[in-house]
Amino acid sequence: MERKKPLDYYVEYFPGEKWNETKGTMYRHMECKRCGQMSKCSENITAVTCSDCVQEIMNDAHGGPEAYGKTSTGRPRGWKWMQLYVDKDGTVFHRGEEQPELKGTLPPSVIKDKGNRLSKKEKEKIKQEAGSRLFKLKKQYKGLRWKKDKKTHSNTSNTYKKRLNKSESHCFLR
């Protein structure tokens, strides 16, 4: 049996520049056998496939990146943990398990809307604003002379302190 000759691909040596590479050390780079993009490899490699080509091959084999994403069932969040949930088509679920003998016997479950809820970024922005206002108030507090002025400042600073400490969304809606 005749041995195959190694294919010749373009090889270059570049000094290490990334955070996990030793500065000044020369690393071997070889062109990809499919697209020609230079990829880092070890000394005894005869051919290399770059990460982009590997990703393309895997997407073709397994249905692309959309196959791994979440798919909506059309049911609300937490329906699996509800005591009793009835889908729009009449399918009855008891703690996430379908009850085929009860299908169509109960009206669909009504899910209450939580209303205007703030996202994590919005809450963080409000907390940041409250912190900056509190800092300004504390600065002004030092220059106050009269007790009545100090009392009004302390009341407003207490409201900002509450906003900083609370994680519930109802305190942010004001």
Image (cartoon, grey):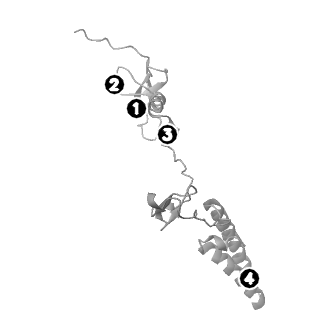
Regarding residue 38, the answer to whether it shows in the image is yes
Which three-letter amino acid code belongs to the residue tagged 2?
Answer: Glu
Which three-letter amino acid code belongs to the residue tagged 1?
Answer: Thr
In the rendered image, the residue lying farthest to the bottom is 147
| Circle number at residue 67 | 3
Residue count near mark 1 (Cα–Cα under 10 Å), binned few <14, some 14–19, many ≥20? few
Viewer-proximal residue, 1 or 156? 1
Query: Which residue is tagged 2?
Result: 43
| Circle number at residue 153 | 4
Quarter containing the N terminus: top left
Q: Nearer the viewer, mark 1 or mark 2?
A: 2
Query: Which residue is tagged 1?
Result: 25
Q: CA distance from mark 2 to mark 4?
A: 71 Å
Quarter containing the C terminus: bottom right
How many marks the image carries: the answer is 4
Q: CA distance from mark 1 to mark 2?
A: 14 Å
